[in-house]
Image (tube, helix red, strand yellow):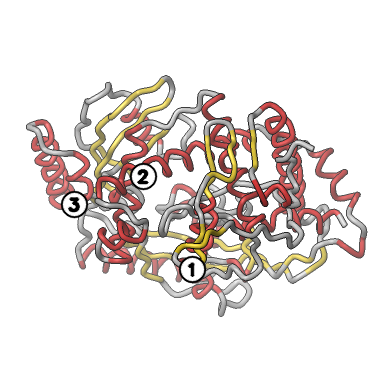
Amino acid sequence: MLLKKIQLKTIDYKFALTICFLLFFNSFISAQEIIPDVVAEKPVEIVSGQRQKIDGIIATVGDYIVLDSDIDKGYLEITSQGGSTKDITRCQMLGKLLEDKLYAHQAIQDSIIVSDAEVRSMMEERLNYMMQQVGDINKVVAYYKKNSVEEFKTYFSDILKEQKLASEMQKKIVDGVEITPEEVRNFFKKIPKDELPTFGAEMEVAQIVVEPKVSKEDEQKVIDRLNAIRKDVLEGSSFATKAVLYSQDPGSSPNGGFYKMTRKTPFVKEFKDVAFSLAEGEISEPFKTNFGYHIIMIDKIKGQEVELRHILIAPTVSEDALKDAKERITNIRKKIESKEISFADAARTESDEKETRANGGTLVNPNTQDTRFELTKMDPTLYSQVSNLKDAEISQPLLNTDDKGKKTYKLITVTNRIEEHTADYAKDYTKIKELALKEKQINAIAKWFDEKIKDTYIKIIGEYRDCAFTNNWLKK
């Protein structure tokens, strides 16, 4: 029953609301369980012989309120993103809204800060996405029944700030949860044998990567271009606008190149070294990482955290350089095929990819930090490259273009295959640890709700007091 309980408690992910149009708000873990089908009817009044809904406050959590219309917006958001609402009751919607409000309220009590610059960056990203989807900001304004773009932005800004506070509070709770090997072992022992999970077929993959050599002339062109951009900014141009126009980093260019980071943030060393050497308002000289050339401007320094903007431009790779790279990797393949060198040794001595070179080219699954890739969850591009490979077979040279437009050639091989099987403690320790940690995080969230609900002013009004909430919102 233990795993079934985990599934019940985590199923609330499908109820996660995106309070803003086409906004993707990432929840971490929710302790809200499935609620019995108790539906609170909305109050109505008769106007000119017609029944009309009355909007108003239905709940208060600390300094936050919930309107009856917020529940309706929740339904609209799910529908607008293609989801089904037929099994979601108004009580379930309200339960999730109450959770989000309590997270945000407690974040303020815990002095979690969301800066105006961060909200502006989020706003730019979301508005850019909206514009791509609907083409006209006025349609969004009309959707939310606001009188102007500025009124909508003010409203939207408040929502984004509240959501960011809530997500930071969730993250703080979850990040504080750790699990020991003994706890993992005890977790596994509690699972009845007939309820052990089944793990799908997996494989381990290794690769060798060869990067085309960029000429000194092409590198200098990029450096000169970044220096020109830097000069324009120093003379008064907007760094954020330049980042939107010219940066080749798809993860930050829509937000004007914005990132918030600490020394523990997983950026490459060269980037962090420059970022933490600058003062507020200072712009770096162009510098190189394995992604290309960058310039950084520091927006704000808050203790050990910096808010910055950056522009990335990668040198253009010539056709001759691509041809030379393909020839080089073809020769590496021939040596492996003729048994002159093993794939792993070739990766260690010949591969240009630092991240995999030391482990003989073995790839790490970014979602699990394990070396195994479950076939049904594998990246479609990677799956297409390995699905037809036989044991010990090496792919032909593959031209790869990453999300930043960088071109490389690579060889891929499957080093291990794991068939679908029932969970085994020794073989599947990493996955079992994830399940055990998830249960412990859920319990931590549940305990947190119990404690904070007792200490927070919460009021639920009218028919919604009849909802069968899992959390003790009514303090009975």
Between disc 3 and disc 2, the foreground one is: 2
Q: Residue at x 72, y 29 (%)?
A: 454
- Residue 360 on image: x %, y %: 55, 54
Query: Vertically, is 7 above or below 174?
Result: below
Q: Nearer the viewer, residue 231 or 410?
A: 231
Q: Residue at x 48, y 68 (%)?
A: 50
How far is disc 1 from disc 2 in space, using C-alphas?
A: 30 Å
- Residue 203 on image: x %, y %: 64, 66
**What residue is disc 1 on?**
50
Q: Nearer the viewer, residue 208 or 289?
A: 289
Kindly identify which numbered label has been placed on residue 155. Answer: 2
**Badge 3, how many Cα within 10 Å: few under 14, some, many 20+?**
few
How far is disc 3 from disc 2 in space, using C-alphas?
A: 27 Å
| Quarter of the N terminus within the rendering | bottom right
Asked if residue 111 lies left or right of residue 471, the reply is left
Residue 10 falls in image quadrant: bottom right
Query: Vertically, is 243 above or below 231?
Result: below
Residue 169 falls in image quadrant: top right
User: Which residue type does callout 2 highlight?
Assistant: Tyr
Mark found first going from the N terminus, 1 or 2? 1
Kindly identify which numbered label has been placed on residue 245. Answer: 3
